[in-house]
Image: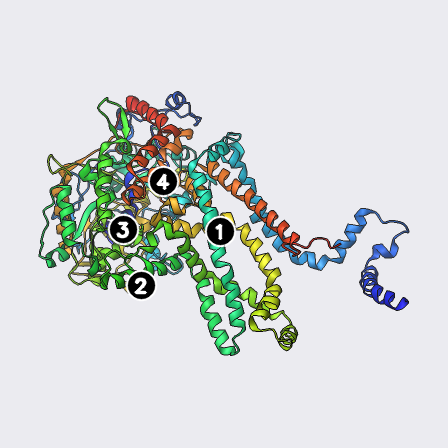
Amino acid sequence: MDLEASAGSPSARHLTRRGFLGTAAGAAGAIAAAPLLAACGGNAPAKTGSTTASQLAKILPAYQPRSIAGLTPDFPSVNGTAPGYLNYPTTLARTVSGVPGSGGSYTGTAPYWGAIPRTSGNTYYQAINEALGATLNLAPANGNLIINSLPPLFAGHKLPDWIDVPTWAQPPGFGQATQGQLADLTPYLSGDKIKEYPNLAAIETVGWQQGVWNDRIYGIPTVVQQFTTGFYLFYRADILDKLGIGTPSIKSAADLLALGKEINAPNAKRWAFDDIWGYLYQPFGVPAGAGTTAGWTINDKGDLITQYETENIIEAMNWERQLFQQGMVNPDSVAGQSSTAKNRFYAGQMVITADGSGSWNYSDAIAGAAANKGYERAAVPFFTASGSGTPKMPLAPPTEYLSYFNKNLKPDQIRELLRIADYLAAPFGSYEFTLINYGAENVDYTMSGNGPVLTATGQKDVDSGAAVLLASPNNINNNPGYPSVTKASAQFAAQNAGYGYKPLFYAMNITVPNDLTTANAFGPFVSPTNNIMYEVVRGRSSIADYHSTVNEWLRNGGTRLKAFYETVRSKYGTA
Amino acid sequence: MTLPKTTVLAPQGGPQGFQGAGSPLIAGGSGGSPPRASASWRKITRDRSLLIMTLPAAVLLLVFGYAPMLGLVMAFQNYDLYDGILHSPWAGLSNFEQLFTDPGFWQAFRNTVELFSVQLVLSFPIPIALAILLDSVLSRRLRGFIQSVVTLPHFFSMVMVITIFNEVLGGAGLLDTFLRSHGVHNPPQIMTNPGLFKFLISGQLIWKESGWGMIVYLAALAAISPSLYEAAAVDGANWRQRTWRITLPGLRPIMVLLLILNLGYALTFGFEQMLIQIPAVGPGAAQVITTFAYDNGIVHGNFGYGAAAGLFLGVTSVILILCANKVAHLLGEDGLYRTRRK
């Protein structure tokens, strides 16, 4: 698995409606300061300090990009896109000298999707631990359940030594947990101190910003990529070719609707769309979430409003409703079976779908080709619903996965773990990177002309997903054996990245007071069981119902939440 | 008339004498009425092997059934995950005030009652009918085969059951695909029709659980003496009369017991089933109290509120059981426990 794949697949699964709206079970963060909370009447514990831009500049680690001599990307980074490499380098450079560990033994937990590899006799773990000179006992946690398993872990003070907490799974009031239970890494990483760990120093600064809570550095960002969007609008290029349509020219929502009508054929068991709600934020200009905060924007009067109070979201709902009414959405998607969306896409039972940008990779190409020989995924360039004006794409924060150390670790142990993290963050093209992602050569993988190929043992034992989510370099785009996928996705990103913009409170961590956590969860808009937008587009609720839901949310703390965010805005700015 | 008297006394005296012999307390006891404590001690020593056998179950119940109930304190708190139940601020009854004025909660309550009732009425008689039918099959082999086939779905997870239903009845499933290929433009989308939902979930439950439920009734049928049937047949009773007069009355105690137990689950039923299918039909048709509590407690992080909904559910369930049990006693059945016979 390369980085694109390992980071892409979990995030793709999580960039569901819930992830995209950026309002997973409670926002948390660095900004909340004692006076601020007191002003809002919250009963949260007092906290000192704030993270204004100037304060951030003081503590953030220095950025020192690192490249491997002789290795240049075929598609250099444009506007923050991941650099694309068509081929996997076969001569591997070492970026870490000596053995990072000093014999310590640590437990590490990160979300994992798929069958958990064996622990005893696992050749991959053996290879990693040997290289690290320490024992890293990885305990992968079920990625689908982690949102429910993390809160009791924190509440019970039962954290492992090293834990990945996805931004969408932060327990409510995470800002309190960071101070109480997680190690403060500022003394080790702030400013030039990070240069002791050159691979960590090569992680982009905006990623580190997400790891800052209450004035201090706690989190280590993983698979950082500046140009990150919630969704792309994908289509099956091979099906459109077969239908004689070729590359569609979508310049407006009307164009998309027309294309849908043209290709929708339920009798042939082929529907035009899956539920593409997650993507409609782009053409309709709905302010999207910025990680742990929901989407905010500023109205004509200059006041903060949420995405749910905008006209844009109403327009988007009204538009998507047509797709459902006219029977253009695959019935399984109408029934809300989002987990099988990829299967429908592979089987050609729907042609246009919204999915995470990370799903455009070689494992997707393999899975798609298994179902359909000519399988080809392509994406619709960003557009505006009206067809006029410049398209805008709200950027998602550069990472959804940050790892943290347990506060009970001693300084020497923290240093040892940071050296291990530095090892894990070795760049693409290095010996270490290959080891972390593919295990030991000739045991877990063999090097072919296309790059590493997992052996039978490797397929069973290699668990790069968990290690990568503890520490990893900035994201890159490489698909061993599928250079065409790298080319298409890298070119698409480069052509569209210019439309990206940073939404309000981008990459900021904000802790809301205790009594506002419920309002800040935006339950009626994100709940998997009671989501008003989901109901409206399916025609079971009306726009009037939607308005009354918004009003009810405002009454139940929403108005106070807005006041809180206004205070944050005036004190700390919005970016 | 001494003979009848002794025959009546004999069974009573027997066990008593047996117990007394094993009890040192009795042997050494002074005359007059024994103190209360010694009476209960006597019972404990008498039943000690039985008590030891129930101990593990009692401990399990205490640890996993009763101890977690302390967490219900949350319902009266503004519960904070990090402060725990010991340090979270008290909220009085405000969680309940909010609960009882929340239209979403009453919607969930109505759904729970409606879905449960429809499901109960439709699915309760099926295992009984199956058991009676199967009991009349003479071939042992055929019986075993049928029993295996109808019991199997019980071991499927709810996710699998719903997936199978979706593959058959869903909008892209067998039925609709067949209809479409035969010129029906808008085939019925059974899986996403809120109006049909109560029948859909009943169907799922019948398919999954009827065979399993049948086993208990088969056991009860085996306990009905064949001589009753023989006598009835000799008296000229036909099959219908025998079923009505012998079989069903014979099954009545177990039916009542299962009905009461079922009622105990009335408000907690179908959590998984609903959680999976709410996206298909919407909360208007499928939100029940358990999913409501989950949604508010876990998803929205409002634990106190979720606990309040949970506590309401628990108390209501207990009341339901007690009422059902009372009704059973009035009907002359044992219900959950035996009432003192006069």
How far apart marks 3 and 1 lie (CA) works out to 43 Å
**Mark 2 highlights which residue?**
A457
Residue at mark 1: B117
Q: Chain of mark 2?
A: A
Q: Is residue A32 left or right of residue B66?
A: left
Choose the circle earlier in sequence order: 3 or 2.
3
Question: Which chain hosts label 4?
Answer: A
Per the image, label 4 sits on a secondary structure element best described as: strand
Three-letter code for the amino acid on which mark 1 is drawn:
Ser
Q: Give the side of residue A406 with respect to residue B257, left or right.
A: left
- Residue B314 place in picture, x, y as percent: 54, 44
SS under mark 3: helix
Residue A15 visible in this rendered orientation of the protein: no
Q: Are marks 2 and 4 on the same chain?
A: yes
From the viewer's side, name the closer residue of A100 and A164: A164
Q: Of marks 4 and 3, which one's residue comes earlier in the chain?
A: 3
For the residues labelled 2 and 4, the Cα–Cα distance comes to 31 Å
Tag 4 near tag 3, CB within 8 Å: no
Query: The N terminus of chain A is located in which quarter?
Result: bottom left
Determine whether label 2 and label 1 are within 8 Å by CB.
Answer: no
Question: Which residue does the numbered mark 3 point to in the structure image?
Answer: A9
Which subunit holds the residue at mark 1?
A: B
Name the amino acid type tagged 2.
Thr
Give the alpha-carbon distance from disc 4 to disc 1, as whole Å. Answer: 50 Å
In the displayed structure, B9 sits above or below B272; it is: below
Tell me where residue B82 appears, x and y as whole percent. 46, 35
The residue mark sitting in front, 3 or 1, is 1
Relative to A397, A529 lies left or right: right
Q: Are marks 4 and 3 on the same chain?
A: yes
User: Residue B163's image quarter?
Assistant: bottom left
Location of residue A303 with respect to B137 vertically, above or below: above
